[in-house]
Image (spheres, rainbow, N blue to C red):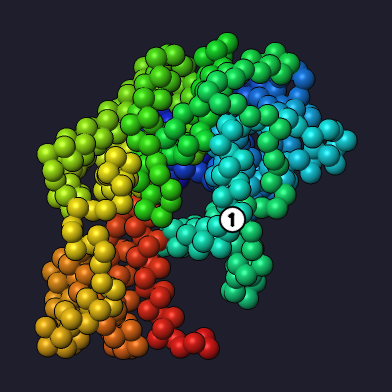
Amino acid sequence: MADLDDLSPLDLSTRVIDESLSGVRVNRVDGRLSELGDDLAMVESFSHCVAFRTGDGLVLFDASGKLSAETVTNSLRSWSGERIATLVYTHGHIDHVGGSGNLVADNRNRGFRDPRVIGHEQVAKRFARYRTTNDWNIGINRRQFGGARGARSLMLAPPTADGGSKESSWSRFLPEDVAELTDTFATRTSFRVGDLDVELRHARGETDDHAWAWIKERKTICSGDMLIWAFPNAGNPQKVQRYPGEWAASLREMSSLEPELILPAHGLPIAGKERIRTVLVTIAEVLEQLVAEVVDLMNEGASLDEIVHTVKVPEEKLALPYLTPTYDEPEFVVRNIWRLYGGWWNGDPSELKPAPASDVASEMVGLAGGVGSLVRRAQELAQSEDLRLACHLVEMASLAEPDNGEVHEIRAAIYRQRRNKETSLMAKGIYMGAVRESEAHLAGPDS
């Protein structure tokens, strides 16, 4: 696939979609810049930065993250040394806003005034929440991205030369130099810079503060994370509420405009009206199906457990290159739909006001005749690939005897096996987090 990786983003996306290619690297984050049209460029990073030359300065969509900021800025400046006139945040996630401080500093170093920074009115509230829950969010991202090879360079602090980590010095989840909004909007807004007219539209989907842009004269959409070349991030188990139904409606709205170019913040740009329509409508249909099936079962009185193990997305849909469950996955989206419509209680009366999990685990260990019986059975289940049940049993064993080294060895092995069987980065990260918990226990408090 090396030859494919050398293709331009538009040529690559055309081949991947038209030929239904699998196993192709569609999320390229190495900072390469590609010209996609007259006065239009994209820097592929985490997230991308889309740039328009307008005749009166640059208009940028997203600023990438803190750790990729220097690379993105250098790539952008290899294309244009013009003033950054306007920066649009498609939403307030740190991989979209974290690099803004670097861009603003570069603008100032060139003698330009600071850019106008535009985003939805909820972005400022997100920033405030990130500052309030700083340590919690750092912990979430370490776990979420810590289970995938290569992810450290994207969202976590880089390793030091001696193999250690700078994580302890990377103390702010939202970088202190992030550019604050100068202009906000609620539903829609329009602005003009030079010869570029942009309309921004609010859409709840992955976030409550998302905006996407329609540039009518160019028949172009800057979609942010409404399109990510993976299964929609509508179920993240560690983050706040997502909105899959509204996400689907926004994709249909985009399709109705008949764009000829769509520029996502992750993955590849797509050219061609019919190709774009197919992608947008297919993703919308999958999200709509999940919402409809979950709500129907809720109306029938099904429990969350029943729904999670009933509602599925057809495998042929998940095989599509823009719907692969490599980041989020349908099972997590099902849970988020339940949370959106039904709250946090899962329908099990024993879970409404439960006993401490360690007390339940101790009772189960006693009934099983000791922790050894539980972990041996967990190992048997893991060997037969029944990893869901194996994890339940080994977790009970570790809760009942949290200082048992043998239990932690087995726990680490089972969760590592499960991590290696998963496809989504979110599941891999959480299961690898469990491995590291047990390995840290085995290493001792002074390690």
Does residue 354 appear to the left or right of 146 in the view shown? left
Residue 409, percent across and down?
31, 83
Judging depth in this view, the residue of 139 and 427 nearest the camera is 139
> What is the x, y in percent for residue 187?
53, 23
Residue depicted at 62% across the width and 70% down the height: 168
Task: Using the image as rendered, state which of residue 429 and residue 93 is in the foreground.
Answer: 93
Q: Quadrant of the N terminus?
A: top left
Residue 54, image x and y in percent? 71, 19
Task: Work out whether residue 233 can be spotted.
Answer: no
Going by the numbered disc 1, the residue's amino acid type is Thr
Q: Residue at (59%, 55%) from the top-left corner?
A: 132
Side of 410 relative to 10 (left or right): left
Residue beneath the point at 76% across and 40% down: 104
Q: Residue furthest right?
A: 111
Residue at the front extreme of this rendering:
353
Which SS class for mark 1? helix
Are there few (<14), some (14-19), or many (20+) residues within 10 Å of tag 1?
few
Residue underneath mark 1: 132
Q: Which residue occupies the foreground of this view, 343 or 120?
A: 343
Q: Residue at x 75, y 32 (%)?
A: 115
- Please tell me whether residue 280 is drawn above or below residue 384 in the rendered image: above
Residue 270 point in image, percent of width and height: 45, 26
On the question of residue 243 being in view, the answer is yes
User: Who is closer to the viewer here, 220 or 333?
Assistant: 333
- In the rendered image, the residue lying farthest to the top is 217
